[in-house]
Image (spheres, rainbow, N blue to C red):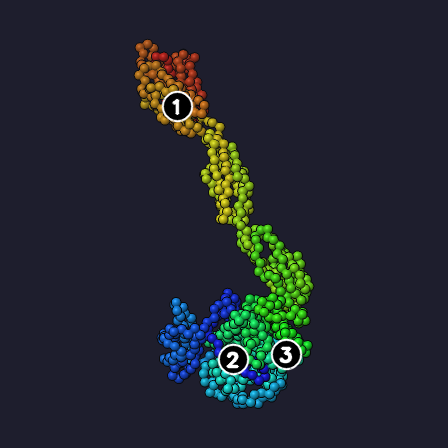
């Protein structure tokens, strides 16, 4: 139906397509229109046409503009389902609860669409809060006589009888919900409206001939006419739309728009605002449902109503674009079409789109929108030129709405709407002078290091301040007036973690504008102060390595002789390195490997020199008994390979070669000759030689002349310090050796009594042998401490 004059015509009422409720897309609110804006619109609609609270019989009607030939699937919510076309009737076994039915449209290629339908048998639960009585909405049960502050009210109005409220919503329920909507919308106009008798009450009156609803903004008290379906179907969004007309056409109180923008040019203003108000109210109503005392079923009904009407809004915006963006602020009375419909729906749609992008809800931008429009005055009215269709008036109407949205969102939106072919006048925009505070960028990403300075243009009609939330993000200007470029500088981010800072640009009476700067985390780094070291063979305990890193790291050694004081670390630290002594003459190498995730490993190669060659033997003079039963052992202490040479056939050396420190065992076969025999062993290694003289006693042969066996005596025995050997013929050799055959003393006698110092000997058993070329005598003694 064409809208030519809100004083006499029924407001546009569209039979719109219903579709599922949009879920919040990562926002703090529980409800928004983001999914409706970004998603595909449904072509399927379904609603409860009849609900019999006594029998449980329900009829769901609807349609689908795609006209699928496959029957719809009706899932009734009571574990039953049927297939068929609209309308479908179902009888529920019990009416003690409500049901969530689903209607599924089946398309070719297995594509589907689904809408939810609430089947309500029980009444919703409302916990009402106090409503300002001056803002109450009433649905009178008897005719109400209206006066008027502008046009005369229609004569076809009557009252809704009690028969209309036998369903889920009682008269008082609906009055309360509408009163909440009225309160929300009254707040949108900053409490600045014409009032009748000090109130802004609204009354809902019946127009049995109306297909939808229409505003009676000009009556005292203010009212709106409603067709029967508007009440029986509880079309909340459409009722919020008509109430939006009532409020916006009665503001500002001292110079209301009503009557001053009427006629063929009214829709671009009045219908735009009614669309904005109904959907802004829907957002606020659902997101604050708990504070208004609405239960979940009322919330479902509200969501469904407002999201469904938003689908209509989007469709007409899409139609505007598809039809070549044909702007109209004037409805031609000579045509049957409503030329301005896609235009004003586009303005309202863009308002909602901006609100969803801003993520601050709808209350603030709607109040700012109205604060700007409440500057309305006689000169604005003249420029609006409500009864004229010419380019100048067309441009002013377009510019007025764009300036209002620019003021609402504090951003110059002329470029956006010029792209939609709106005939915006820069002269009119400057005249209207909307308050602006906007930024050329709100989200900025910079590198972790060496980030280039960031230039952001502040567009403002006022003075402003800019404050950074973090010390690493600095500004070249903390305040300004009007338009100016500010430069943001981010210091290097040494951390691996990304970080964020905000710059709040604020001005009195404006919503803060926020620049969010996201700085990437640094790439992991790892460095060591030295990569190669050479140390000597002795132990080194004072080495240190400085690790420079911005992440956690580990260090491991390739050899046990090279150790560190810590195997794990984070950031910059010093690692103490300990090198064990190198006993070998051969140099050796070990590697410290430093590892960190995401970065090339670092190594420190430590080369340790070989030790000075060492080769010693624990005994250089050995005496073995003649019988071959005794063995002698010698400790070879060395840090190199060695061999034993110079052996005789009567000697056995085990082992005769080795590496490092080992013990060798020397054994001899029995000596049957009376003469002592000897061999000189040479231990050789690394160019160094050590000698071991091994002697073996000769066999004892008893002589006929002057035997001395019984003459030799030892005392004291045991002995601590000095051992006396008596009865030794002059010229005999005395040899003293331990149980291993190692010679401790060797001397030739010059007299028959010899005193030998044994104080330095280790406690144990020893032998004293007195021998000549022909005979030998052996005596045993014990050394004690």
Please rate how many residues cluster around mark 1, counting C-alpha atoms within 10 Å: few if below 14, some from 14 to 19, many from 20: many
Res. 328 mark: none
Mark 1 lies on a secondary structure that is strand
Which residue is tagged 2?
A: 13
Whether residue 511 is visible here, answered yes or no, is no
Percent x, y for residue 75? Answer: 38, 74
Distance of label 1 from label 2 (alpha carbons):
118 Å
Labels 2, 3: front one: 3
| Quarter of the figure with residue 645 | top left
Which of the two residues, 68 or 111, is positioned nearer the viewer here? Answer: 68
Residue at 56% across, 88% down: 154
Work out whether mark 2 precedes mark 3 in sequence or the reverse, and give the earlier one: 2
Where is 7 relative to 783, above or below?
below
In the orientation shown, which residue stands out farthest toward the front? Answer: 334
Identify the mark at residue 644; answer none if there is no mark.
1
- Side of 301 where 416 appears, left or right: right
The residue sitting at the top extreme is: 705
Q: Which mark is first along the chain, 3 or 1?
A: 3
Occupied quadrant, residue 222: bottom right
> Circle 3 is placed at which residue position?
388
Residue at image point 49% right, 80% down: 234
Q: Judging from the image, what secondary structure is the residue with disc 3 in? A: loop
Spatial distance from mark 2 to mark 3, Cα to Cα?
A: 26 Å
Q: Which label's residue is closer to the chain start, 1 or 2? A: 2
Is the C-beta separation of discs 1 and 2 under 8 Å?
Answer: no
Between 152 and 302, the one lying in front of the other is 152
Which SS class for mark 2?
loop
> Where does residue 718 sit, x and y in percent of width and height?
39, 24
- Residue 125 screen position, x and y as percent: 47, 79
User: Residue 33, position in %: x, y?
Assistant: 51, 70
């Amino acid at each position: 139906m064409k809208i030519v004059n809100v004083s006499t015509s029924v407001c546009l009422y569209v039979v719109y397509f219903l579709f599922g409720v949009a879920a919040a897309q990562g926002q703090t609110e529980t409800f928004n229109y983001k999914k409706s804006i970004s998603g595909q619109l449904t072509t399927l609609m379904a609603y409860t046409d009849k609900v019999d609270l006594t029998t449980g019989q329900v009829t769901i009607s609807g349609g689908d503009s795609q006209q699928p030939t496959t029957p719809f699937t009706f899932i009734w919510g009571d574990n039953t389902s049927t297939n068929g076309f609209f309308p479908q009737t179902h009888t529920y076994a019990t009416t003690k609860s409500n049901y969530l039915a689903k209607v599924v449209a089946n398309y070719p290629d297995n594509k589907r669409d689904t809408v939810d339908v609430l089947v309500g048998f029980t009444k919703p639960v409302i916990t009402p809060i106090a409503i300002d009585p001056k803002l109450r909405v009433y649905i009178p049960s008897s005719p109400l006589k209206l006066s008027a502050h502008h046009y005369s009210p229609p004569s076809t109005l009557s009252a809704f009888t009690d028969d209309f409220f036998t369903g889920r919503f009682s008269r008082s329920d609906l009055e309360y919900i509408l009163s909440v909507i009225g309160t929300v919308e009254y707040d949108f106009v900053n409490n600045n409206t014409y009032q009748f008798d000090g109130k802004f009450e609204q009354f809902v009156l019946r127009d049995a001939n109306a297909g939808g609803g229409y505003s009676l903004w000009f009556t005292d008290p203010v009212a709106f006419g409603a067709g029967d379906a508007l009440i029986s179907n509880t079309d909340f969004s459409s009722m919020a739309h008509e109430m939006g007309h009532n409020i916006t056409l009665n503001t500002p109180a001292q110079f209301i728009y009503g009557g001053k923008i009427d006629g063929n040019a009214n829709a671009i203003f009045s219908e735009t605002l009614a669309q904005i108000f109904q959907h802004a109210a829907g957002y606020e109503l659902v997101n604050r449902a708990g504070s208004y005392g609405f239960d979940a079923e009322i919330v479902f009904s509200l969501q469904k109503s407002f999201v469904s009407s938003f689908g209509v809004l989007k469709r007409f915006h899409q139609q505007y674009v598809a039809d070549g963006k044909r702007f109209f602020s004037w409805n031609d009375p000579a045509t049957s079409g409503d030329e301005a419909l896609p235009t004003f729906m586009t303005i309202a749609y863009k308002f909602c789109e901006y609100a969803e992008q801003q993520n601050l809800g709808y209350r603030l931008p709607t109040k700012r929108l109205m604060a700007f429009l409440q500057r309305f005055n006689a000169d604005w009215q003249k420029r609006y030129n409500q009864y004229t269709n010419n380019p100048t008036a067309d441009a002013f109407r377009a510019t007025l709405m764009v300036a209002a949205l620019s003021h609402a969102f504090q951003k110059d939106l002329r470029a956006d709407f010029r792209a939609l072919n709106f005939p915006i006048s820069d002269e009119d925009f400057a005249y209207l002078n909307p308050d602006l505070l906007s930024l050329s960028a709100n989200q900025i990403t910079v590198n972790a290091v060496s980030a280039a300075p960031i230039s952001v243009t502040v567009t403002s009609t006022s003075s402003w301040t800019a404050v950074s939330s973090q010390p690493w993000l600095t500004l070249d200007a903390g305040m300004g007036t009007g338009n100016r470029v500010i430069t943001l500088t981010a210091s290097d981010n040494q951390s691996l973690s990304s970080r964020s800072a905000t710059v709040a640009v604020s001005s009195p009476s404006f919503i803060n504008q926020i620049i969010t700067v996201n700085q990437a985390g640094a790439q992991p780094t790892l460095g060591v102060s030295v990569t190669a070291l050479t140390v000597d063979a002795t132990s080194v305990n004072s080495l240190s390595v400085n690790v420079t890193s911005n992440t956690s790291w580990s260090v491991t050694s390739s050899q046990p002789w090279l150790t560190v004081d810590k195997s794990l670390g984070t950031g910059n630290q010093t690692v103490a390195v300990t090198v064990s002594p190198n006993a070998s003459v051969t140099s050796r190498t070990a590697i410290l490997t430093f590892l960190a995730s995401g970065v090339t490993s670092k190594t420190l190669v430590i080369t340790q020199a070989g030790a000075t060659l060492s080769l010693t033997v624990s005994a250089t003079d050995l005496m073995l008994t003649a019988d071959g039963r005794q063995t002698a052992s010698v400790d070879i202490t060395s840090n190199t390979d060695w061999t034993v040479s110079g052996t005789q056939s009567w000697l056995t050396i085990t082992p005769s070669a080795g590496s490092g420190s080992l013990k060798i065992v020397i054994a001899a076969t029995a000596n049957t000759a009376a003469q002592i025999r000897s061999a000189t062993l040479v231990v050789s290694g690394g160019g160094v030689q050590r000698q071991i003289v091994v002697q073996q006693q000769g066999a004892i042969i008893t002589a006929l002349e002057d035997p001395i066996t019984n003459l030799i005596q030892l005392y004291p025995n045991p002995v601590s310090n000095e051992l006396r050997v008596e009865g030794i013929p002059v010229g005999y050799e005395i040899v003293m050796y331990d149980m291993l055959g190692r010679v401790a003393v060797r001397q030739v006698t010059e007299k028959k009594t010899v005193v030998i110092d044994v104080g330095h000997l280790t406690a144990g058993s020893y032998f004293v042998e007195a021998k000549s070329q022909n005979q030998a005598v052996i005596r045993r003694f014990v050394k004690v401490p």
